[in-house]
Amino acid sequence: MTKPRILVAREVFPETIERLSQHFDVEANPGATPFTRDELITRLQGKAGVFTTGSEQINADVLAACPDLKICANMAVGYNNFDVAAMTARGVLATNAPDVLTETTADFGFALLMATARRLTESEHYLRAGKWNSWSYDMFAGSDIHGSTMGIIGMGRIGQGIARRGAHGFGMKVIYHNRSRLSPALEAECKATYVAKEELLRTADHVVLVLPFTPENRHTIGEAELKLMKPTATLVNIARGGIVDDAALARALAARQISAAGLDVFEGEPKVHADLLALSNVVLTPHIASATIPTRLAMATLAADNLIGYLVHGKPLTPINPEVLAA
């Protein structure tokens, strides 16, 4: 029996390729460089499935050019690289990799918060440049985390994980804003209080963004929102590029309108706004919030399991558009 043909669009763990090869005729991208749009379309010809990362844009044009495609399995919890409506219209299943990265990403979010508030990278660069030759009372004095107020925008599983770390580990007061309010039981577990977005921005010492990217969420934090924040406040984005207006943030940081920012995601990444790169009061990391070997392997395994589950057994694990299954 001929195996279904699939494409693995980015370099991934050898054990993931080996597992997929037991069920499929696999064409793999051996490098870290993503395919161009035209390369992706060419390589998807005759393929029933594709293993994607956030770099591969699956839109109506790509789908129209790849009529054999039945499933796109994202090795990520976010899927703003998918045009889900277009996929559903063409009967193409979309899947993602939720849950397996929750705690690791929450760890990183809190680490980025701490690095931002305590000016860790700024002070390390100073030391490495050989500039440290004396002590002063205010040298790289940052802001406290313990006992401060943390405002979380986007209170899904990752946001809840960050809330628990702050409330239970550091005695922080946690406030949050979300599209829908959590249940009383979850609020109690996270020691979190629901507030309006404007109140959160005015009140929080540290604002953490963990909301998904949608057209409605684009520039959730822009010039107007930054003006509401305290001049001593910090902003952390581990959500998606485009949630923050990076140009407006760079202006606010340069003017010390807010104290500092920590960013793991960017508009137009992997490009980073040049004005952000020039600032000392921003911590910049290259979209690595889920980057531990166990977590990345779990993400890859779940994407592979979705391909196997759907194309072999007709039962994907984490469908985004399950209405395709009923068609």
Image: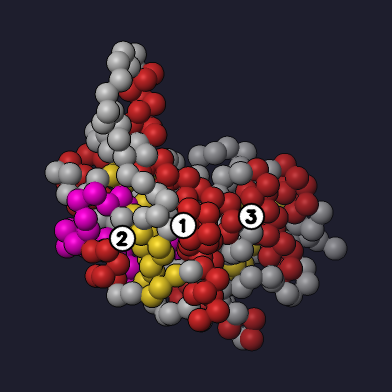
Residue located at (27% from left, 63% from top)? 203
Does residue 213 belong to the magenta stretch? yes
- State which quadrant residue 271 falls in: top left
Residue located at (53% from left, 54% from top)? 169
Disc 3 marks a residue whose amino acid type is Met
User: Counting residues from the N terminus, which is met first, the one under dot 2 or under dot 3?
Assistant: 2
Quarter of the image with the N terminus in it:
bottom right
x, y percent for residue 179: 39, 77
Local secondary structure at mark 2: loop
Residue located at (28% from left, 44% from top)? 260
C-beta proximity under 8 Å, tags 2 and 1: no
Disc 1 marks a residue whose amino acid type is Gly
C-beta proximity under 8 Å, tags 2 and 3: no
Q: Which residues are magenta?
A: 210-235
Label number found at residue 204: 2
Local secondary structure at mark 3: helix
Q: Which residue is mark 3?
A: 299
Residue sitting at the far right: 1
Foreground pick, 291 / 113 = 113
Local secondary structure at mark 1: loop
